[in-house]
Image: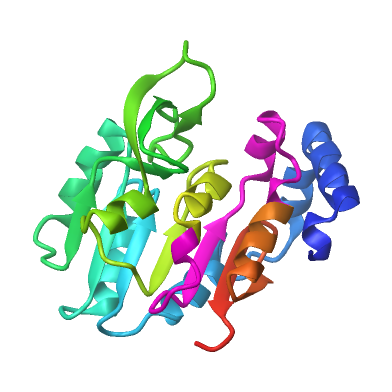
Amino acid sequence: MSWRTHRLVVTLRSMGRALGLNRWIAARLPAGGGYEARYDSGFSGGLRPGDHVWDVGANVGYYTRLFAGRVGEQGHVFAFEPSPTNFQRLATASAGLRNVTLRACGLGREDGKLRFQQGADDLGATSRIVDSAADGIAVEIRSGASLLAGGEATLPHAIKIDVEGFELEVLEGMADYLRRPPLRMIGVEVHFGILKQRGMALVPQQIESLLQRSGFAVSWLDSSHILAVRATA
């Protein structure tokens, strides 16, 4: 367990969020190339020509296009996006990319249907699965294990996960595959605030632990982004 996921730190972070201190502090820190800059360069820089990548929570295709360029014609990107609105924009952004396969579904612990709420922001970046059956629309959820067992996708070299508080479910849905080559790198955006709302404030510890048990060295590139690299990669 790292200090970032220690119970006390998570509690202080939650208090800071409630008081508005987290945004105040973040606004006064050096930009360093912009939000997510270290994560962008760390994950994308670890991709190699010919790699297969899963873009889980592809949104409108920013990373999908970036990854497609990095892995080249011999590589492939599988982009997963459950939001019908975001998926249309993802399809437009990915048009003409022959090394990209789009899937109109989210990933989770098991196959099924969950409720989905479209984000109010321009990019739909805050769109997310919701726990209440009264909210949102029904969307398809697949487990990574089911996709792999059915030959619907290939085991990737790298996985990027940005799923607004359902990070652990994505990983648990393919837990048996996390130790297997060629998978060597996993990038996760951990949504502490949403996890707290779901009553799952200590899930970041479980994410770290699962990745470490699966043979990955876990690094926090900033306050919300994990880069996990297989120790023997």
Q: Is residue 192 magenta?
A: yes
Frontmost residue, 75 versus 126: 75
* As drawn, 128 above or below 181: above
Q: Is residue 56 magenta?
A: no
Give me the residue at 77% from left, 46% from top. 22
Display colour scheme:
rainbow
Q: Locate residue 152, reporting x and y percent.
A: 21, 55
Please give the name of the residue rendered at 31% of the width and 49% of the height, measured from the top-left corner. 80
- Indicate left or right for 9 with 92 as reference: right
Q: Residue at x 78, y 56 (%)?
A: 5
Q: Position of residue 155 (x, y in %)?
A: 33, 67
In this rendering, the count of numbered labels is 0
In the figure, residue 197 lies in which quadrant? top right
Rendered residue at 29%/52% (across/down): 147
Left-right relation of 100 to 193: left
Percent position of residue 129, x then y = 47, 31
Residue 186 visible in this rendered orientation of the protein: yes
Q: Is residue 28 left or right of residue 35?
A: right
Query: Which residues are drawn in magenta?
Result: 176-204
From what the image shows, is residue 228 above or below residue 64?
A: below
x, y (%) of residue 160? 44, 61
Q: Residue furthest right?
A: 8
